[in-house]
Image (cartoon, grey):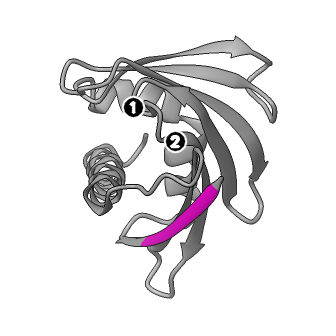
Amino acid sequence: MVAITYDIEIPSSIPAAKMFKAVVLDADTLIPKIMPQAIKNVEILEGDGGVGTVKIIHFGEGSQYKSAKHRFDAVDTENLTYSYTVVEGDAFADVIESITYHVKIVPTEDGGCICKNRSIYHTKGGVEINEEKIKEGKERAMQMFKAIEAYLQANPDA
């Protein structure tokens, strides 16, 4: 198995704790609400919503994929960190074993934040991942983060 890692940092004007709540704690209901073309709904398969919980994400009409299974690995609400692993999905084909994501929301001096996201792709049997696929993943992450940011700006009491 080969591991390919990439990092992305996305700045925001939203305070870190508020962004963390939206991106991590409220994501299962918030993202289908603001981006139904991307995510139709999220269903818990095992667990109580905490660490160890396994969820299936059903993608929306705008996606070329149907679903992905996520395992909730860790959360630290004080340090604003979150980790999860995509363990199954029709996008994996015969190339990817799993993808682990480590997310950290860092406060900035201006009252906003930076979302730091590390993605680790574990491939099957030494298979190389197309750079375009990684670029697509980065763009989707950026779009989702920016959609959440726009929603929070438009709904300050959310």
Q: Which residue is mark 2?
A: 96
Q: Which residues are magenta?
A: 2-8
The answer to whether marks 2 and 1 mark residues whose Cβ atoms lie closer than 8 Å is: yes
How crowded pointer 2 is (Cα within 10 Å; few <14, some 14-19, many 20+) is rated as many
In the depicted view, which residue is nearer to us: 80 or 58? 58
- Mark 2 and mark 1 lie on one chain; the one further toward the N terminus is 1
Label 1 amino acid? Answer: Ala
Query: Can residue 87 be seen at all in this image of the molecule?
Result: yes
Mark yes or no: residue 116 visible: no
Specify whether 41 is left or right of 44.
Answer: left
Tell me: residue 134, above or below residue 94.
below
Residue visible at 39% across and 31% down?
91
Along the viewing direction, whichever of 126 and 134 lies nearer the viewer: 126
Q: Which residue is pictured at 28% across the width and 20% down the height?
A: 60
Residue bearing mark 1: 91
Q: Nearer the viewer, residue 98 or 71?
A: 98
Q: Amino acid at mark 2?
A: Ile
Q: Quadrant of residue 41?
A: top left
Pinpoint residue 141: horizontal percent, then vertical percent: 36, 52
Q: Quadrant of the C terminus?
A: top left
